[in-house]
Image (cartoon, rainbow, N blue to C red):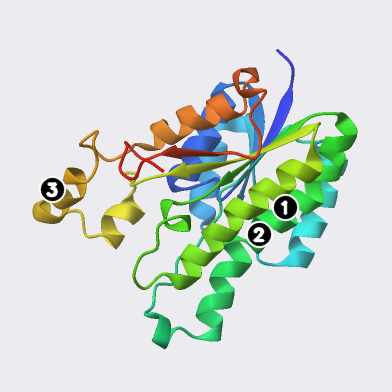
């Protein structure tokens, strides 16, 4: 098996953890980036040994990303897959939203993918191949209350995906994977889905009548990084059980 390297930002928890694990199963060495939860990072490395490295990098910090990327390329080589998954929420009504609320979310959700891709794409282009998968959100297309910062960041990520697909072609493919309501602890807490009535109301809007699982998202990622999607670039792949059908 060819020894391949993948990088997953926000790769130690939630959906990102499942994406990291799936790439390991596909035979990749994976570097999972994280910002704060060192215990989760240590558990991940303990489970997978030398197939996974966990690096503490805040993708909102330009200098930190640049320094880390130089070390990665020098010590581990050029990644064939980059998954821009790291994201944050700071929900607030628009008229109460501060400059910090706005800039914090944009710095991670939109500028983070820009910085990581800018740092690693030249080596991918030089290697003659590469795959960038940006993890979007349905709210990048459909707005919601109290999330102007988050929605704007994810809408921007869709357009960034298209621009990068144009500029990095023909060697590097760039696509956006958009999860719908995916069953994670963060989602259940945020939308109070432990309330049976709230959960039933959400499921009534989804034709598949269930929440997505992180494995559903990993299945889509597996397709996007495989030769089976070799003619696919600059596209959005929405995995939402048919909830919005865009």
User: As rendered, which of 171 and 75 lies closer to the eye?
Assistant: 171
- Is 213 left or right of 13, judged from the image as shown? left
Which badge, 2 or 3, comes first in the chain's sequence?
A: 2
Q: Is 171 rendered above or below residue 33? A: above
Which corner quadrant of the image does residue 180 belong to? top left
Name the quarter where the C terminus is drawn.
top left
Alpha carbon separation for disc pair 2 and 1:
6 Å
Q: Residue furthest top?
A: 1
Residue drawn at x 40%, y 31% as measured from the top left? 215
- Is 127 left or right of 145, judged from the image as shown? right
Q: Is 143 rendered above or below residue 202? A: below
Whether residue 36 is visible to the viewer of this picture, yes or no, is: no
Report which residue position mark 2 lands on. Answer: 112
* Coordinates of residue 233 in the picture (x, y in percent): 66, 34
Q: Secondary structure at mark 3?
A: helix
Alpha carbon separation for disc pair 2 and 3:
35 Å
Name the quarter where the N terminus is drawn.
top right
* Coordinates of residue 106 in the picture (x, y in percent): 59, 68
Alpha carbon separation for disc pair 1 and 3:
39 Å
* Coordinates of residue 224 in the picture (x, y in percent): 58, 29
Q: Residue furthest right?
A: 126
User: As rendered, which of 38 and 185 lies closer to the eye?
Assistant: 185
Within-10-Å neighbours for mark 1: few <14, some 14–19, many 20+: many
Q: Is 109 rendered above or below residue 136? A: below
Report which residue position mark 1 lands on. Answer: 116
Q: Secondary structure at mark 2?
A: helix
Report which residue position mark 3 lands on. Answer: 200
Which badge, 1 or 3, comes first in the chain's sequence?
A: 1
Residue drawn at x 63%, y 54% as measured from the top left? 159
- Is 143 left or right of 177, judged from the image as shown? left
Residue drawn at x 75%, y 58% as measured from the top left? 65
* Coordinates of residue 221 in the picture (x, y in percent): 53, 32
């Amino acid at each position: 098996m060819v020894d391949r390297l993948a990088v997953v930002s926000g790769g130690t928890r939630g959906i990102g953890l499942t994406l990291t694990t799936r790439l390991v199963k596909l035979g990749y060495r994976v570097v999972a980036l994280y910002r704060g939860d060192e215990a989760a990072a240590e558990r991940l490395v303990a489970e997978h040994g030398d197939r996974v490295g966990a690096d503490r990098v805040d993708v909102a910090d330009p200098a930190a990303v640049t320094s880390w990327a130089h070390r990665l390329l020098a010590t581990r080589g050029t990644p064939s897959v980059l998954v821009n998954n790291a994201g944050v929420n700071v929900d607030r009504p628009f008229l109460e939203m501060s400059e910090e609320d706005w800039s914090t979310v944009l710095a991670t959700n939109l500028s983070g993918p820009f910085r990581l891709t800018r740092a690693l794409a030249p080596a991918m282009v030089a290697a003659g191949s590469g795959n960038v998968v940006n993890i979007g959100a349905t709210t990048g297309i459909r707005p919601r209350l109290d999330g102007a910062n988050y929605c704007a960041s994810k809408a921007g990520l869709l357009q960034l995906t298209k621009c990068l697909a144009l500029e990095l072609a023909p060697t590097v493919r760039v696509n956006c994977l958009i999860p719908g309501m995916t069953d994670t602890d963060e989602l259940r807490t945020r939308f109070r889905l432990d309330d049976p009535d709230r959960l039933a109301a959400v499921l009534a809007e989804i034709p598949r009548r269930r929440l997505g699982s992180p494995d559903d998202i990993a299945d889509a990622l597996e397709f996007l990084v495989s030769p089976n999607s070799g003619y696919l670039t600059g596209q959005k792949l929405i995995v939402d059980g048919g909830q919005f059908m865009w």
